[in-house]
Image: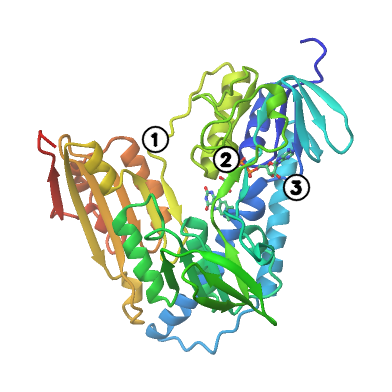
Amino acid sequence: MPDRDVDLFVVGAGSGGVRAARIAGSYGARVMIAEEYRVGGTCVIRGCVPKKLLVYASRFADEFEDAAGYGWTVGEPTFDWAKLIANKDREIARLEAAYTTALERADVKLVKGRAVLKDAHTVRLVSTGEEIRTGHILIATGAAPHPGHPIMGIEHVISSNEAFHLTALPKRVLIQGGGYIAVEFAGIFAGLGAEVTLVYRGENILRGFDDDVRAHLRSEMERRGIRIICGRTVAAVEPTQDTFTAKLSDDSLIEVEKVMFATGRRPNVAKLGLEAAGVRLAKNGGIAVDEFSQSSVCNIHAVGDVTNRINLTPVAIREGHAFADTVFGGKSTPIDHSNVPTAVFSEPEVGAIGLTEAQARHRLPKVDIYKTLFRPMKATLGGRDTRSFMKLVVDASNDRVVGCHIVGPEAGEMIQLIGVAVKMRATKADFDAIMAVHPTGAEELVTMREKAVSYERQAAE
Ligand SMILES: Cc1cc2nc3c(=O)[nH]c(=O)nc-3n(C[C@H](O)[C@H](O)[C@H](O)COP(=O)(O)OP(=O)(O)OC[C@H]3O[C@@H](n4cnc5c(N)ncnc54)[C@H](O)[C@@H]3O)c2cc1C
């Protein structure tokens, strides 16, 4: 294609797009990237990073409570939401600038504005109408909040996008949803002093996680004063004077200052010109791709949330990097989506990798379960009423640890490291062989001796 302007055009400068553009640039490709909102994408601008900063802010409440038990006299703490948001925004702006600089250093040309596909080799910049001829296209447009079925008053409902920019901390909040974003924001608002009600249509929060984790997190959240209502939905939201009244599917009414929906996210595939280019979608609404992130059109790839595989930042980054290695680096690099560790920054935190107990029982003939429940040492002197929970799921036919599930302080940090062992196919005997680090919470993971339960599938089952 001698008439092309660039070798690679990346649509979307989020986690996956930025990594792919930089790596392709480092291989000598001429790369252009378009971003319609802010460089850094969801994770940096209105996802993982600002969320974790708010989580940190919310956790000081427990610290103040614990401090008294350790001899500290802490005056009546006061909290300034506006200051937190301003400081958070400053940090996000710094990160956005760092991402932009990283693109410049890799000789990637950044265009601010929306880009759409005209055909398999042409991208159109919407604001100027300019058309760019390119050898390859990478679609990395991410996903956006989806409010679910339309209800009366939906215009009064915010999503996580707006939650990061509220001008004041609401005193009473209703959050609809049971996924990780819903439980994380419930913990944030509650930790900062709001009265929180979580409404979820399913039978329990955190669908897809281990059942014991779901039950334990729910009881811990309720212990912290979060009201959790399962099996119901928000049917309507009506503005009252300074508040909103949410009507639930059982006709009960809840009055709050803010209603937030965290009811799922949908891949950003609309009005992108995918049909014109011949790019097919998968049943889950994402762009259909193979293990090399190649779409149904051979020179068009897609990575990250727009493919709706595992919607996490490190996965998008790895997919973007592997794409650049494969297409521009001469290193064919498929992505392995098995055993991806994950954390939920709820209060307390959740860390998980591998099979849940139910999945293991379904897939494996023999399963051993180890679990423990204990009070974190730091909570003892202050008398804070909380428990940590840990579970190991073991394939009893070969002793391999095939799942690990943690609820408690630093669960995210722990699961990152346990993930190495699980990915390396460590056995329960390997876990037992390592000396414990004492006194830590993590030592409980390597000192579980008694099986809580064993399952063996009968031949006829
Ligand atoms: C509240 C929240 C908390 C989260 N917390 C975590 C967490 O703790 N850990 C974790 O791993 N993941 C977390 N995630 C998920 C994570 O943010 C995403 O998985 C990740 O950002 C996906 O990266 P991506 O490159 O696919 O898309 P994105 O980062 O969303 O980037 C896509 C970019 O494309 C741009 N774009 C879209 N269409 C166009 C177009 N036509 N032209 C130009 N630009 C376009 C968008 O503006 C956006 O900047 C969280 C998400 C949310 C919403």
Mark 1 — residue?
338
Drawn side of residue 134 relative to residue 337, left or right: right
Q: Residue at x 46, y 59 (%)?
A: 178
Q: Which of these two is toward me, 223 or 252?
A: 252
Q: Residues within 10 Å of mark 2 (few under 14, many from 20)?
A: many
Mark 3 — residue?
37
In the image, residue 257 sits, relative to residue 395, either above or below, namely below
| Disc 3 Cβ-to-ligand 1 distance below 8 Å | yes
Instruction: Please give the count of numbered marks on the rendered protein.
Output: 3
Q: Can you name the residue that lies furthest to the front here?
A: 251
Check disc 2 and give the amino acid type. Answer: Asp
**Colour scheme of the rendered structure:** rainbow
Q: Residue at x 45, y 86 (%)?
A: 72
Residue 136 in the image: x percent, y percent? Answer: 69, 21
Disc 2 secondary structure class: helix
Mark 2 — residue?
305
Disc 1 secondary structure class: loop
| Disc 2 Cβ-to-ligand 1 distance below 8 Å | yes
Instruction: Give me the C-alpha separation between circle 3 and circle 1.
Output: 32 Å
Q: Is residue 408 visible?
A: yes
Mark 2–mark 3 CB contact (< 8 Å): no
Ligand 1 in which quarter: top right
Residue 159 in the image: x percent, y percent? Answer: 62, 60
Mark 1–mark 2 CB contact (< 8 Å): no
Check disc 3 and give the amino acid type. Answer: Tyr
User: Disc 2 or 3, which lies upstream in sequence?
Assistant: 3
Q: Can you name the residue that lies furthest to the top here?
A: 2
Residue 152 in the image: x percent, y percent? Answer: 64, 64
